[in-house]
Structure formats: C-alpha cells, structure tokens
Amino acid sequence: MNSTAPARLKLDHVTKTFGGVHALTDLSLQVAPGQIVGVIGPNGAGKTTTFNVITGAYRATSGSVLLDGHDVTAEPSHRIARAGIMRTFQNIRLFSDMSVWEHLLVAQPHAGSFARRLLPTRFSNPKAIERAEEVLEFFALGDVRNRLARSLPYGLQRKVEMARAVTARPKLLLLDEPVAGMNHDEAETIRSLMLRLRQDGLSILLIEHDMAFVMNLCDHLYVLDFGVLIAQGRPEEIRLNPAVLDAYLGRAA
Ligand SMILES: Nc1ncnc2c1ncn2[C@@H]1O[C@H](COP(=O)(O)OP(=O)(O)OP(=O)(O)O)[C@@H](O)[C@H]1O
Ligand SMILES: [Mg+2]
C-alpha cells in the first residue's frame, strides 16, 4: 500500500465487550484499496462482531474505525452504509416475499422515497433500473429475476445477498461466510465474481471457514482466536503458522 494514502478501512485498537465477555480485544487491522482481506478463526472468535463494529451495528467499547481516513466509529449504521460500507449476513437476511429484482431496486440510494421503496417495480427511477439490470447481469441472476427470495435455493439466496450489497456501489464490501453451504462450483462462481469486483477497485473484507477458498483468494489474512489477533500475513505464511494450527487443530479433540 502507498504509505501516504489512507487505508480504505482501518481498525485501530478496537475492543468490544458484552458485559464480562471480551468479544474483541485490541484488534487492529487494515484493508487497502482494491485488496481482498480475510478474517478467519474458530467459532466465537469475534469475526462477526468485527463486522458489527465496522458497520455501526455495535459501538466499539474502545478504539476506532476509519474509512478512507475518516473516523466513523460513532456514526449510526445508515450513515456508515451511505459512506460506502455494505455487508452481507452470516444468516441470510433477504425479504422472503420480494423478488430478486425488487431487492436490487430497493438497495439503491436513488430508489426514491420510502413509499417508492415499498412499490419498487412501479416507481423506481431510470437510473435505479439501469443499475439493477447491470448488477443482475454481472451476477448472472437474470433467469431468476422475478423469483421470490424464499423460493430460491440456498446458494442463490447467498448470491442475491451479495448482489444487493454491491448494488449501491460500495467502497468496501464485508462478506460474512459468503460460500457457507455452497457446493464447489457455486463457491468458484463467487470467487471469480469477487476477483472481478476487486479488479473494479472494490475492497473486500471476508469472513470464511472454508480454508481452501480463503487461501486461494485473499491478499492478506487476519486470524482471531477468543477475540484476540493471533496472526496475520499472506495466506502462505498463515498456512504454516504454529499458533494458527494450534487454534484450529489443537481444539479438534
Ligand atoms: N450481542 C451479543 N451479546 C453478547 N455476546 C455476544 C454478542 N455478539 C457476540 N457475542 C459473543 O462474542 C463472541 C464472538 O462472537 P462472534 O459472533 O463475533 O463470533 P464469530 O467469530 O463470528 O463465530 P462464528 O464462526 O461461530 O460465526 C462470542 O462469545 C459471542 O457469544
Ligand atoms: Mg460469525
């Protein structure tokens, strides 16, 4: 990364506690523009909490979150979204009775007023329609555009979540286990979509349990265990790191 340019995302000594639970302890991490960065670690390590702090769903107990050098730590989540951070959820959060197309329309800043958002297909403006078409094509979702979210197989629901998050042209995309439950071919499709998004300059922070997927995709990895950063580096360094092996394998018994 260019040392004079601010990181796209920077977490600076972030701690998050819930009562006596230390979900995150003094976590610092960075994502440079156009990088794909992974956050890995065993269950309960604090990965999703990291996303919740970044997006303003949770307020950090201490430390700060910076987007392009601007402190967004205390901002409400809708302002953080508007500033350019979009996410997907570990547990899919689509509107079950809305079509794929409607999801892409309402995800946009120019979708219009709240009333218009309730009736997206009737009232959306041409810009919103054009963008939704573009995203539909990029994600190859044209065949299912009119299907209701609840009628889609799981893998496609995950894809629609990612498409929705991309629609508003974020600067930073946070993906919480984007290939969980997908077969190999579906995961490969997601991988190539992520590489194309990176080519377009998008920065991606990714949580994923599928090690092969992460190792083949990420520029840099952060490893959490019990809310503490135990290692970071390039995938090939992380693969052989003794602390990482211990965190994953030492607890298998
Ligand atoms: N809202 C909350 N209230 C209380 N404790 C919480 C809350 N959210 C998370 N935690 C706790 O924080 C810790 C980290 O949880 P988190 O969901 O971030 O883990 P994770 O790394 O995403 O795990 P997984 O791989 O299972 O998704 C856990 O001990 C969890 O119980
Ligand atoms: Mg999680």
Image (cartoon, rainbow, N blue to C red):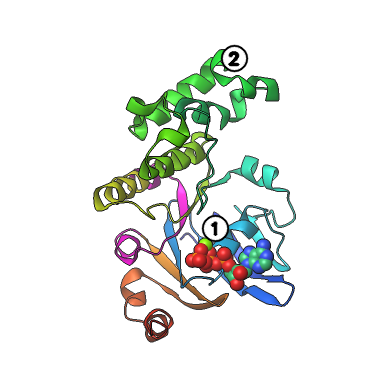
Residue under numbered circle 2: 123
**Secondary-structure class at tag 1:** loop
Q: Position of residue 247 (x, y in %)?
A: 43, 81
Disc 1 residue type? Ala
Location of the C terminus by quadrant is bottom left
Task: Say left or right for 210 vs 6.
Answer: left
Q: Is residue 148 above or below residue 53?
A: above
Q: Amino acid at mark 2?
A: Phe
User: Which one is earlier in the sequence, the residue at label 2 or at label 1?
Assistant: 1
Mark 2 close to ligand 2, CB under 8 Å: no
Do we see residue 5 in this rendering? no
Specify few, some or many for label 1: CA neighbours under 10 Å numbering under 14, 14-19, or 20 or more.
Answer: some
Q: Residue at x 54, y 35 (%)?
A: 168
Task: Give above or below for 114 relative to 74.
Answer: above
Per the image, label 2 sits on a secondary structure element best described as: helix
**Image height check: is 193 above or below 208?**
above
Q: Measuring 34% from the left and 76% from the top, which residue is drawn there?
A: 237
- Foreground pick, 99 / 23: 99
* Residue 44 found in image quarter: bottom right
Q: Position of residue 20 (x, y in %)?
A: 72, 77
Q: Which residue bears the numbered disc 1?
A: 7
Is 98 positioned to the left or the right of 208 in the image?
A: right
Question: Residue 186: horizontal and vertical position, in percent?
Answer: 29, 47
On whether residue 8 falls in the magenta region, the answer is no
- Residue at the image position 60 percent from the left and 25 percent from the top: 110
Q: Which residues are magenta?
A: 196-217
